[in-house]
Amino acid sequence: MPALAQPRAAVRMETKADLQKLAVALNPTVGFWDPLGLASQTFWGTNEQATIGFLREAEIKHGRVAMAAFVGFCVHSNGVRFPFDKIAQAVPADLPAPAVWDAIPDIAKWCAAAGFSSSCNARLAFRARLYKHYPGPCRS
């Protein structure tokens, strides 16, 4: 008989006191550092815990965008071209990565940025509706 799966732990939103304790445990040299006081704020009429959860999820999302941008920079720096991308084929191949971005037509930049942002936000909205997931601590 297969063993039953263990139930997930209850979701617990973190408070500012939890963040202070965690910061000292993770990096005793710096400790808790919040120069803008964001851990004490309440966004959109929510409580402190919901704001901390929102900021954590926003930080993860922005970190992923930064990593994707770095990969794109490396791809352009190494001259990787895809045959199906007609816009990139129109840009000269001997340009450095920042100049490649400047050479791409403005409409293509706006469409790429809007499409990427929309797909990320649609995924988060779908996940929130489907799984009743709200920003907060990671669950395994």
Image: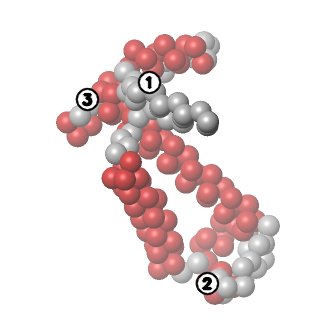
Location of residue 54 with respect to 47 vertically, above or below: below
Q: Amino acid at mark 3?
A: Asn
Nearest to the eye among marks 2 and 3: give it: 3
Per the model, the C-alpha gap separating discs 3 and 1 is 18 Å
Q: Amino acid at mark 1?
A: Asp
Residue at mark 1: 34
Q: Nearer the viewer, residue 135 or 129?
A: 129
Identify which residue is drawn at 58% across, 78% down.
104
Q: Amino acid at mark 2?
A: Ile
Per the model, the C-alpha gap separating discs 2 and 3 is 46 Å
For label 3, the SS is loop
For the residue carrying disc 1, how many other residues have a C-alpha within 10 Å: few (<14), some (14-19), or many (20+)?
Answer: few
Answer with mark 3 or mark 1, whichever residue precedes in sequence: 1
Q: Is residue 35 visible?
A: no
Residue at mark 2: 87
Residue 114 screen position, x and y as percent? 43, 68
Q: Tell me where residue 45 sits by quadrant.
A: top left
Per the model, the C-alpha gap separating discs 2 and 1 is 43 Å
Residue 40 screen position, x and y as percent? 32, 24
**Given the current orientation, which residue lies at the most extreme front position?**
1
Location of residue 112 with respect to 74 vertically, above or below: below
Answer with mark 2 or mark 1, whichever residue precedes in sequence: 1
Numbered disc total? 3
Q: Are marks 2 and 3 in contact (CB under 8 Å)?
A: no
Residue 93 screen position, x and y as percent? 76, 79
For the residue carrying disc 3, how many other residues have a C-alpha within 10 Å: few (<14), some (14-19), or many (20+)?
Answer: few
Residue at mark 3: 47
Side of 50 where 78 appears, left or right = right
